[in-house]
Image (cartoon, rainbow, N blue to C red):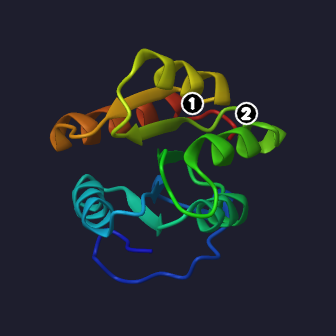
Amino acid sequence: MLDGAGLDRTDHVQPERRERDLVLVADDDRDIVRFLEVNLVIEGIDVVTAHDGRDALAKAMNLRPDLILLDVMMPGMDGYEVCAELRADPRFARTPVIMLTAKSLQNDRAIGINAGADDYVTKPFEPLELVARVAATLRRNAGRDG
């Protein structure tokens, strides 16, 4: 996990002890993950990453991030499955989940929303817009219990 200074931090930061927002970026495309990580850190947001669905679910459960960016097509578990598992846990009822995917059909969007996603962004996406969406969502949710 990188903090604002670009330093690696432990993955065991408890939600109540964080001073900055934490976003989980889960995508099997390592270039997308790194690009999002760098841009979110520039915005003052701490980032933890995952490259498959099972790792994303485990990190979400352990770290309870403030927001999750979740690719749909990942190995192990797809993003829909991860999202549904998170939503089955009451601790994640208010955690925003933004799905990232190359799937742009209306039916795919409906599946994502039905799995519990709050937003659905298709690839290729405008990076600055996505970072702005993340920051706006975190601001709206500030002060809520996650």
Contact, CB < 8 Å: mark 1 with mark 2? no
Query: x%, y% of residue 8?
Result: 40, 83
* Residue shown at 67% from the left, 45% from the top: 81
Residue 85, placed above or below residue 144? below
Give, as a three-letter code, the residue at label 1.
Answer: Ala
Write down the residue under mark 2.
93
Q: Nearer the viewer, mark 1 or mark 2?
A: 1
Which residue is nearer to you in this view: 130 or 26? 26
Residue 136 shows in the view: no
Crowding near the residue tagged with mark 2, few <14, some 14–19, many ≥20 C-alpha atoms within 10 Å: few
* Residue shown at 63% from the left, 33% from the top: 144
Give, as a three-letter code, the residue at label 2.
Answer: Ala
Residue 12, placed above or below residue 14? below
Mark 2 or mark 1, which is nearer the start of the sequence? 2
Query: Which quadrant is home to the N terminus?
Result: bottom left
Q: Is residue 124 left or right of residue 44?
A: left
Tag 2's secondary structure? loop
Crowding near the residue tagged with mark 1, few <14, some 14–19, many ≥20 C-alpha atoms within 10 Å: many
* Residue shown at 16% from the left, 37% from the top: 126
Query: x%, y% of residue 15?
Result: 65, 58
Which residue is nearer to you in this view: 6 or 106? 106
Which residue is nearer to you in this view: 82 or 138? 82
Write down the residue under mark 1.
117
Q: Quadrant of residue 64?
A: bottom right
Q: How many marks?
A: 2
Residue 85 shows in the view: yes
Tag 1's secondary structure? loop
